[in-house]
Image (cartoon, rainbow, N blue to C red):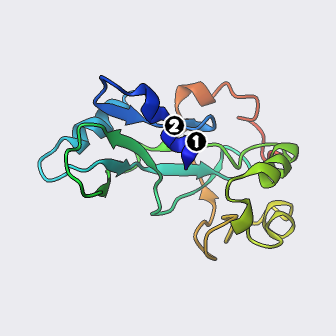
């Protein structure tokens, strides 16, 4: 969490933070839409969870879950109490595309070695879920059944991903 909170050293004069990891892409306009939703009456908080879809082994399969990561922060929050609200995808229009599990095997092995979640990693996940190209119960850390991959229409992806070298692959290995 120290690396996540380091951004606060650079936020003086700003109202909002949109925190993004290198393997995440949001559709154009999503940040503005999430801020608009966060400003609606009754939705004031200091942290907001945003909708995610997680690629699984290719661009044509994805996992969804209700544990959307916190990516938007309200820096003008004036309460001593913490509050977190989940924002609306508007039927899938606004979802961050997470590509962390649409990578070559060597990068997944590296991720296993350096991840901050390493102590939580499920025993035998790499062999039983990743290498087996399982489609059910594929989340590396969370409880069984948290992620089940389903077919995904990759034509709905943000334009930036359609030129990705893995876009046409049936499976990324």
Q: Which residue is mark 1?
A: 3
Q: Which mark is residue 104?
A: none
The secondary element bearing badge 2 is classed as helix
Relative height, residue 41 to residue 125 (above, below): above
Q: Is residue 141 visible?
A: yes
Nearest to the observer: residue 171 or residue 126:
126
Q: x, y percentage for residue 76? A: 23, 37
Q: Residues within 10 Å of mark 2 (few under 14, many from 20)?
A: few
On the image, the x and y values in percent for residue 78 come to 19, 45
Q: Taking 22 as reference, is 65 left or right?
A: left
Q: Are discs 2 and 1 less than 8 Å apart at CB?
A: yes
Image quadrant where residue 82 sits: bottom left
Front-most of 153 and 65?
65
Residue displayed at 78% across by 40% down = 169
Q: Is residue 47 left or right of residue 10?
A: left
Distance from the alpha carbon under mark 2 to that under mark 1 = 5 Å
Extreme left residue here?
Answer: 41
User: How packed is label 1: few (under 14 Cα within 10 Å), some, or many (20 or more)?
Assistant: few
Q: Which residue is mark 2?
A: 6
x%, y% of residue 30?
Answer: 38, 34
Q: Is residue 143 above or below residue 43?
A: below
Q: Position of residue 52 (x, y in %)?
A: 49, 50
Within the image, what quadrant is residue 103 found in?
Answer: top right
Front-lying residue, 50 or 12: 12
Write the residue at 40% across / 48% down: 50
Specify whether residue 135 is in view: no
Say which element carries label 1: helix
């Amino acid at each position: 969490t120290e690396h996540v909170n380091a951004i606060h050293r650079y936020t003086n004069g700003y109202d909002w933070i949109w925190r993004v990891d290198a393997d995440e892409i949001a559709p154009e306009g999503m940040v503005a839409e999430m801020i608009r939703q966060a400003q609606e009456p009754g939705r004031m908080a200091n942290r907001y969870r945003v909708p995610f879809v997680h690629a699984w082994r290719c661009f044509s399969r994805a996992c969804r879950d209700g544990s959307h990561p916190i990516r938007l922060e309200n820096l003008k929050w004036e309460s001593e109490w913490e509050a977190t609200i989940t924002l609306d995808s508007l039927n899938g229009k606004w979802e961050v595309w997470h590509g962390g599990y649409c990578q070559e095997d060597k990068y997944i092995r590296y991720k296993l070695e350096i991840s901050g979640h390493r102590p939580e990693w499920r025993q035998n996940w790499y062999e039983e879920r990743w290498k087996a190209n399982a489609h059910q119960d594929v989340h590396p850390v969370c409880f069984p059944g948290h992620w089940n991959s389903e077919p995904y229409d990759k034509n709905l992806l943000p334009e930036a991903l359609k030129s990705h070298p893995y876009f046409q692959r049936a499976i990324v290995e």
